[in-house]
Amino acid sequence: MLKLLRYLAIPVVLSLGLSGCQPEAAPTAGEGATTAAPVVTAPTTNDPVAWEAYVKQELQPHMDPRRFRGRPFSYFIPMVDPAAPDAPELQRQFDAQSEAIENSIGRGIQAGTMLAFAGPDSNAVAGVLEKAFTFAAPKSLNNVRIVVIANAQERARIEAAIVPSGAEFIFVDMR
C-alpha cells in the first residue's frame, strides 16, 4: 500500500513543482497594466535603505544567474564627515568595511562570485579599492565579477587597481 501511495504522489509533486514554471499571462488593458518602477537616483547620504534600493537597481542589468551564483556580495563604503557629530562612529564603520574588503580580496574570492562596491564618496571608494586590490595576486580573481558604482572621474583609478587581478570589471557611473 505504501508503495502505491509513493507512485501516486510523484505526479502530484511534479505537477505542483511545474506549476510555478508556467509563464504568466500578460495583463490586458482592462486588468490594469503595471508601469515601470521609478528610477532611483544615487543617495548623497549614508542612508542604508536608500543605498540598498539604489545598488539593487544598478546591479540588476549585470546579474547573470548562469555564471554567478546567488546574490552579489555588496559592500557599502560610508562617507565620513569629520565635522559631523557621528564622525567617530562613521569612521569606525569605514575602517571596519575597509578591513573586511581587504581581507576578502587578500584571501581570494571563489570563481562564480559577484562583488559590488558603492558609497556616497567616490574618492573614498576608489581609495579603499586601490588599497584592497594590492592584496590580490595577479590573475587570482578569474571568473569573478566586480561591479563598482562611482563617479566617472574615479573610473581609471579603480580600473587600474582591479584589472590585474583578472576579475571582470564593470563600472557603473553613479547618477
Image: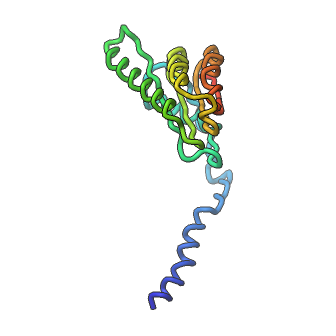
Locate the C terminus and report the quarter of the image it occupies.
top right
Q: Nearer the viewer, residue 35 or 69?
A: 69
**Corner quadrant of residue 136:** top right
Residue 56 picture quarter: top right
25 versus 143 height, above or below: below
Name the quadrant containing residue 20.
bottom right
Compared to residue 102, the image places residue 30 above or below, namely below
- Would you place residue 17 above or below residue 90 in this image? below
Residue 71: x, y in percent?
Answer: 53, 43
Q: Is residue 98 visible?
A: yes
Q: Residue at x 67, y 54 (%)?
A: 26
Q: Is residue 97 left or right of residue 156?
A: left
Q: Position of residue 31 (x, y in %)?
A: 62, 53
On screen, residue 25 above or below 19:
above
Residue at 64% over, 46% down:
67
- Residue 170 at x, y = what percent? 65, 30
